[in-house]
Each structure stands twice: as structure tokens, then as C-alpha cells.
Image (spheres, helix red, strand yellow):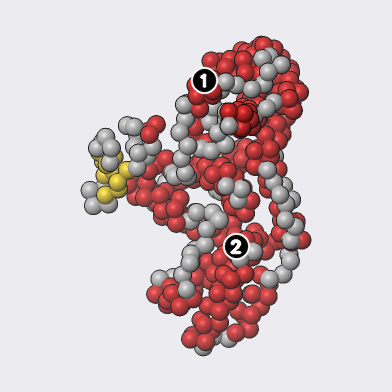
Amino acid sequence: MSNTITKQEERQVFDEWNFTVWSDSRDWCRQCNKEKNKLVFDDQTKTTKCTQCEHIETYKDKEWKILQAKRYVAYHYMPGKYFFGNLPKEEIFQKYLRDLNHVDWSAQLIHDYVLAKMKNEKTIQDKLLETAKLVVEKMSYDSTTWKTLFEKMDTNDPEIFYQVPQIRYEFAEKKLKEATQNKEELHSIMRGYLSTLTTVYSYSRWKNDRVTCWIVSEIIKLCDIESESIAFYTDLFDCDPLIEGFQDDLVTGKKREINIKDSYIQWELRLADKYLQQTKALGATQAAYDALTAKLGIHALWPPTKVLPFDIKTVEKVVNLVNDSELLRFYSTALSLDAIDPAKACYYANLFIEKVKKILPEITPIEQELKKQAAYIT
């Protein structure tokens, strides 16, 4: 059985997407979305303009306020980033004096200190400790409270790590609530926030950033939205080997080497089994399909908006690559029965999954095959 593909077949599949770095879809032009052209935002006229096709979108006052709140949260309250960035301690102290109240400034200090601890960035921890001492000195505060706070943050209690997603979420939620007083509207905004978080997770995973992935997964659990939505994302991320045992690793100082591609394939297979248990034949089949195409090297781990399609024509191409016609039959039968007979659909979805698991070890990825070809030509 041949599990490699030719250069022509490779181009046919790879041409279906373009890779890009993380950015929020609100910043892309709707008229030329495939090219992901950036928009220019004008706060005075409450309009957006595409720099390429020059399409102008005009917003009402309320719509503009919500849009800007969403963008502010996406970029200023990005999980895994420091509130104070690379500011020197004197500028962080100035923020205490001029920009932030005592509670918000203290929360951001705690967030950044614990995040630095999670990332093992001792220099940043030392800077924040010195900043706190500067505040105590300049403001003539009692140093006991601050000393106790830092001692608590320096313990090996894994509960301290929850401060990071908790504080990050509280700031984001507050900003989003300011944009609307309508509960239904707020829930809609929060659903959009969930979508942004999952995109951040996918990008961070691609960058092998376990810290940010764990933070995102915990922020989602805090979101004030329907429990069904939270349960979906909890199931999704709990299956990911990347963040498995994350807190224990932090406490023990264990350095775990994780292969991003292999762990992604394992994640998709776990999801396939999970969805099968929940009688979700479509989700189970697609997860196994994503594992297969990732192993072949024709499925983009990033961006999530440009993954390999799950339609019959593309699946036919993939099945031809692995030379196994049974896969297509299992796929077609599972999807055709999904709406009318879930039990039978799951039966065929399971056959699809088991067949994929059997095929995976035999596959030679495209990248490996191309390297062999290049070496041979040389």
C-alpha cells in the first residue's frame, strides 16, 4: 500500500489555504475575506475601510462600541501576555499613580508575577517584587501585607496558578459588560469571546505554548454563558495531551518534550473516541479524518480557519492517497445515517476511526517524502 503523494497531488491540496499568523477575524475585510486584508478603523466616522478593495463599512454608535470592546479585549487582554509588558519598574509605578486604582493595579501585578512564575521568567518576577517595594516606600504603606502576598505567590500550591486566568477573565468581562446593558446581547458578545479564545488556543498550540493553552482552557470555564457551550469546550481541551498534567509539571519543575504534530494527532483520536461515546458520528468521523490528514502532512495545524475541508471531494482525494476505498464507504455511510439513525451512524463512524488508527503507523508524511526526494536528486 502506498501512503505517499506526488508533488502534483500535494499542490492540489496545499493550494486550498494560505498560512498566516494569529489575528482576529474582526480585523479582516468581509469583501475579500480569503486574502485576510486588514481593515483601517476610524473612531471619528465609526467606519472600517479595506486598504485593498477600499470597501467601507459604517456602524451605528452602539454597534461601534461593541466592536471596539471586542477588539480591545482581544488585543489588550490576550491570554499568556503580561499586563505591564516590558515596562521598567518606574513606569509600572507611574501606572499605579496615574492610570489604575489600587485594586486593579494590584490584580495586574499578581497576574504578571504568577504568569512569570509559570513561564519561569525570574527576571520579571524580581522586577515586579522591586516595583512593589517601590510602591510601599513611596506611598508609606505597611510592608507586611505585600510581603505576605509575595510569600503566598511563591508557594508550590497549584491553586495559585488559577489567579492568572481568573484575573485575566475579570478584566475582559468587565470591559465587555461596559459595551452593553442587555443580557442577551452580552451573551452574544461572550460567545464571540469564546470563539476568539479558541482561535488563540489553536495559535498558541501551534507555537507549542503550553502556558497560554492552559490559561485559555481555564478562562473558558469561567465565562458567564450557557453551560452546554462551556461543556463542549471543556471536553475539547481536556482531551488535549499538550495541557495534560500541566499544573503538576509546574509544581515539580518537570520539563516535558511534546511533539506538536504527534500530540495533535493523539488529541484528534481522543476526540473521535469522545464524540463516539456522545453519539456524535459526524464529530467523531471528522476528528479521525483530521488525525489522518495531519499525519499525511496535508492538514494545517494553523490557521484553524483554513484547515483541510471535510467534504466528499476532498475526502475522496485523501482516501486515494492512502489507497483504502473502505474509508470512503465508512465515511459516506456514517454521514448519510447521522440524521436518521444515530446508532448505525456511530457504528460506521467507529469503523472509520478504527481503520484510521490502523493506517496511521504505515503512513509516510509528505514532508519526510519530499526530503527523501530532495536528497535523492542531490
- Residue 289 in picture, x, y percent from top left: 64, 25
Residue at the far left in the pictured view: 45
Residue 331, position as x, y percentages in the image: 64, 16
Q: How far across and how far down the image is residue 195, in percent?
A: 51, 41
| Kind of residue at badge 2 | Leu
Q: Which mark is residue 319?
A: none
Q: Rate crowding at label 1 as few (under 14), some (14 to 19) or many (20 or more) other CA atoms within 10 Å.
A: few
User: CA–CA distance between discs 1 and 2?
Assistant: 46 Å
Q: Nearer the viewer, residue 376 or 55?
A: 376
| Left or right, 295 with reference to 183 | right
Extreme residue in the front direction: 378
Closer to the chain start, of discs 1 and 2, is 1
**Neighbour tally class for label 2: few under 14, some 14-19, many 20 plus, Cα within 10 Å:** many
Q: Residue at x 46, y 40 (%)?
A: 20
Q: On the image, numbered disc 2 is attached to which residue? A: 115
Q: Quadrant of residue 281?
A: top right
Disc 1 marks a residue whose amino acid type is Gln
**Does 282 sit above or below residue 267?**
above
Check disc 1 and report the residue beneath it: 8
Figure disc tally? 2
Kindly state the secondary structure of the residue where label 1 is placed.
helix
Q: Is residue 351 visible?
A: yes
- Please state, as top left, top right, bottom left or bottom right, where the N terminus lies in the image: top right
Q: Residue at position x 47%, y 45% from top? A: 22
Q: Is residue 55 left or right of residue 96?
A: left
Q: Which of the two marks, 1 or 2, is nearer to us in this view?
A: 1
Q: Residue at x 50, y 27 (%)?
A: 14
User: In the image shown, does 48 or 221 lie closer to the viewer?
Assistant: 48
* Image quadrant in which the C terminus is located: top right
Q: Residue 222: image x %, image y %? A: 59, 51
Q: Is residue 144 above or below residue 29?
A: below
Q: Indicate left or right for 90 with 228 as reference.
A: left
